[in-house]
Image (tube, rainbow, N blue to C red):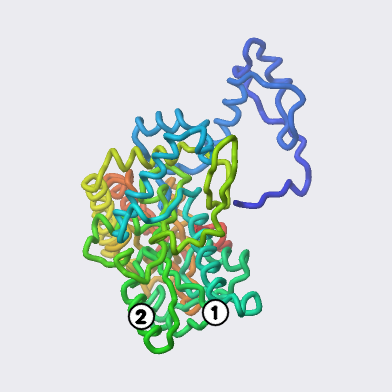
Amino acid sequence: MALHKGPAKSDERPSSVNPFYGEANPVDGMTEAPPRHRLPDRPLAPSTAYQLVHDELMLDGNSRLNLATFVTTWMEPQADILLGECRDKNMIDKDEYPRTAELERRCVVMLADLWNAPDPAAAVGCSTTGSSEACMLAGMALKRRWAHRNADRYPGARPNLVMGVNVQVCWEKFCNFWEVEARQVPMEGDRFHLDPQAAADLCDENTIGVVGILGSTFDGSYEPIAALCAALDALQERTGLDVPVHVDGASGAMVAPFVDEDLVWDFRLPRVSSINTSGHKYGLVYPGVGWALWRSAAELPEDLVFHVNYLGGDMPTFALNFSRPGAQVVAQYYTFLRLGREGYRAVQRTTREVAQGLAERIGALDDFRLVTRGDELPVFAFTTAPHVTAFDVFDVSRRIRERGWLLPAYTFPANREDLSVLRVVCRNGFSSDLADLFVEDLTRLLPELRRQPHPLTRDKDAATGFHH
């Protein structure tokens, strides 16, 4: 959650109110304009309050044209109705809303089956507010299991977690908040994610686990989960160290099962202890809902589970958040029911085809070079060609925004900080027609960009929408 603070100087200007917003007296509507940074003294008419908020939000970007976000930006009208009907249900009150809790349980079992758990009925899982919370829970379980195995040395010994430098920031937060050393495998050359052997080499008796990413946010590529498990199997044979793997499938865990069915990355690998995904990404649900699953109850220490006597019922919970709406869980079950495996396969296949087709067209432009091609996640990254000196990726991001497109530009992390890219995330709802319009707008900009004397974007942070 972002941290906010008040303005350096209090803004005493009232909000501007159109006279037509007044219920009856336009003049009264103008004189009673509310302040910006303190509670107004008197209530406003609901229509006036609505219009004030509505008008200010017009300055937000159009979510359907946001090529930075992985988050779902379109659902069917029937899903919207269900979301509205369930927005007042508190997901944590399972005793009061037993059918919502039952739909959550069914989603967990469906995901366990989708991810090839040995016994889907025995798998343990829960919904979360998103993958960040799910990753925190998975990390907590890894740390607690390690602490149990090393009770004679902990808390004296410091635990560590091995991951690629490309992990989502939630893993850095986990290590910071829970006092775990983050051991990161750097990028090298054209390898933009974790190397299995390099990860195994970083493991020792204090390693709580290794995180593998099924779909890097930097370029859309899958990390080699099976090869990672094989490297850790070999490590155990040599040293006796038994290091579990958590698969961060925030995006790919809802893509690979449908369009990469031969790819082995999930609970078919005995070393995979837990998996998370974002229902609000390629699970095709509005934010925020995520899922965390463990192979069996043995992977989730019982002492992390709270049994709360809450409003008359026993409620086992494992969560960082408490009260949250049940609407997104209901929407997830609706989407599972609505699409089924064949429906998801059709959606994800179409999304990948759009990504690959768009990548091919951008790669054909002389000004750009593809880094990835959208053939794993429906996501690809590209940069300027070596001969381009008049503009850079930050100029492209800034200028294309004038056409309404939110196209993130950013620099890769350690060892490849020389590489700056643009990234396109294709989602359900980003059609081939929209892709055509994007290419047209990008192509239309190029003559102006080529005439620049040099790259013009000074504030790189302001030019990019990539903060996740």
Q: Which residue is at 38% across, 49% downward?
A: 108
- Crowd rating for badge 1 (residues with CA inside 10 Å; few <14, some 14–19, many 20+): many
Front in this rendered view, residue 81 or 462: 81
Q: Is residue 244 positioned above or below 325 on the image? A: below
Q: Which residue is at 52% across, 48% downward?
A: 316
- Crowd rating for badge 2 (residues with CA inside 10 Å; few <14, some 14–19, many 20+): some
Whether label 2 touches label 1, CB < 8 Å: no
In 3D space, how far apart are the residues under numbered discs 2 and 1 (Cα atoms)? 17 Å
Q: Is residue 191 positioned above or below 31 on the image? A: below
Q: Is residue 10 positioned above or below 257 on the image? A: above
Q: Which residue is mark 1?
A: 206
Amino acid at circle 1:
Asn
Q: Which residue is mark 2?
A: 233
Q: Is residue 216 positioned above or below 292 on the image? A: below
| Horizontal side, residue 27 vs residue 62: left or right | right
Amino acid at circle 2:
Asp
Residue 185: image tag:
none
Q: Is residue 400 visible?
A: no
Mark nearer the N terminus (2 vs 1) = 1
Kindly indicate the quadrant of the structure image that contains residue 336.
Answer: top left
Front in this rendered view, residue 27 or 212: 212
Residue 453, position in %: x, y?
48, 67
